[in-house]
Image (tube, rainbow, N blue to C red):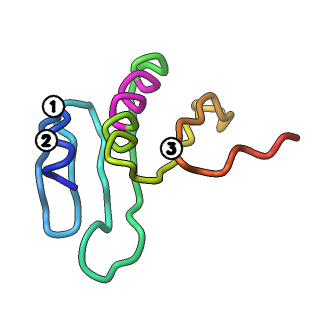
Amino acid sequence: MAELLRSGGLAVSEGRYSLRLTDFDHFVFQEYGGDLGDPHIEFEHYSLDDMLRDAGRVSQILADANLQHCFEIYNDSEEKIGYIHHDWPEEPVA
């Protein structure tokens, strides 16, 4: 995963069970590697517009590698303001 993200032009710092994208304020693939289960992605940003742009950039790299994923983005009021995905079931319509 680290090499994939690097090949997409991102700077990556690798830990034993995490990958941190150092191009962004706080974008971390946690619990990644080994037998810890599915990774948990944590992403925080001060600007929602920048967050949507940066999540889209990471999503495009994953999509180009045909990796199924989904990012749900929420504001401070816990309202969903973004849904970026590749090969993921569409959001249910309420």
Nearer-the-camera pick, 19 or 46: 19
Q: Residue furthest right?
A: 94
Does the segment drawn in magenta span residue 34? Answer: no
Evaluate if marks 2 and 1 touch, with contact meaning CB atoms under 8 Å apart. Answer: yes
Name the residue tied to disc 2. Answer: 6
Q: CA distance from mark 2 to mark 1?
A: 5 Å
Asked whether 57 falls inside the magenta stretch, the response is yes
Q: Which residue is mark 3?
A: 86
Q: Which residue is mark 1?
A: 9
Q: Which label's residue is closer to the chain start, 1 or 3?
A: 1
Say which label, 2 or 3, has the lower sequence index.
2
Q: Quadrant of residue 19?
A: bottom left
Q: Magenta part of the protein: which range?
A: 51-58
In the image: residue 22, left or right of residue 92: left
Q: Residue at x 66, y 51 (%)?
A: 89
- Residue 21 vertical placement versus 75 (above, below): below
Residue 1 location (% of width, % of height): 22, 56
What residue is at 65 percent from the left and 38 percent from the top?
78
Q: Is residue 78 left or right of residue 72?
A: right
**Which amino acid is tagged 1?**
Gly
| Residue 64 pos. (x, y %) | 34, 39
Query: Regarding mark 3 in the picture, which secondary structure is present there?
Result: strand
Q: Are marks 2 and 3 in contact (CB under 8 Å)?
A: no
Q: Foreground residue, 72 or 48?
A: 72
**Disc ID at residue 83:** none
